[in-house]
Image: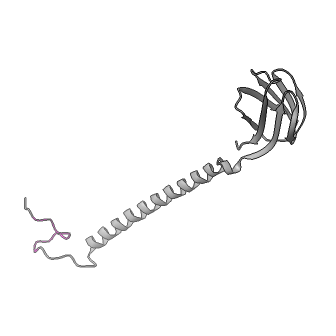
Amino acid sequence: MSSEVDPLVHTNQQEAPKMCDRRVRYWFLRMLLLTIIFSVLIGLLIQIWLYYQSLSDDLDSKNINMVGYVTFCKNQVVKGWNVRDCVIHTTNITCHVVSTDVLDILTLPAQNITHTFQQNTLQVNTKDDLSTTCFSWILLSLPI
C-alpha cells in the first residue's frame, strides 16, 4: 500500500489525466448530477417554506375583522355597533348580530363567558351578575 494518492487515471506510467479522457468526463458528469440533485432539493425546500409562509399569513392578525362592539352598564346597552335587540337577564344576554362568520368575543374587563352564535343570534352566558357591573364586548371574526 503506497502513501501516495491514487491518480484519477490508472496507468502503469503514472501520467497526469488528460482533460477529455473518459474517466475525467465520467467524474465531471457525476459531479454535475450531484449538483443538479442538490439544487432541486434546495429548490423544493424553498417552495415548501414559501407555501408554509403563505398558510401562516392567512392566520395572522391582519385577517382579524371586527364584527361588532357593545357596552353594557347596569342591564342597559350604553352604546354599540352592529349589535341590536339585546335582551339582558341576570346571567345571560341574547343579541342579534348580522354576520356569517364564526365569532369570538373579547370582554373588557375580562369575564368568564361561554357563547353560541347561530343564525345571527348571539347567546352569551356568564357566571357573573350582570346587573351591577359595566363591561364591553368586542366581537371578532377570526380566520378558520
Residue at the outermost right position: 85
User: Residue shown at 51%/58% (left/top)?
Assistant: 46
Q: Is residue 10 magenta?
A: yes
Q: Position of residue 58 (x, y in %)?
A: 66, 50
Position of 81 with respect to 17 (left or right) is right
Q: Find residue 142 and report its horizontal and vertical position in percent.
A: 72, 42
Name the image quarter holding the C terminus: top right
Q: Residue at x 57, y 51 (%)?
A: 52
Q: How many marks?
A: 0
Q: Is residue 22 above or below residue 121?
A: below
Which of the 4 quarters of the picture holds residue 17? bottom left
Residue 47 sits inside the magenta stretch: no
**In-front residue for pair 128/16:** 128
The secondary structure that dominates the magenta segment is: loop
Q: Residue at x 87, y 36 (%)?
A: 78
Q: Residue at x 10, y 72 (%)?
A: 12
Which quadrant of the figure contains the N terminus? bottom left
80 or 13, which is in the foreground?
Answer: 80
Q: Which residues are magenta?
A: 4-13
30 or 59: nearer the viewer: 59
User: With respect to residue 21, does 55 lie above or below?
Assistant: above
Residue 136 in picture, x, y percent from top left: 78, 35
Residue 41 locus on image (x, y percent):
45, 57
Horizontally, residue 130 falls left or right of residue 87, namely left
Picture quadrant where residue 34 is located: bottom left
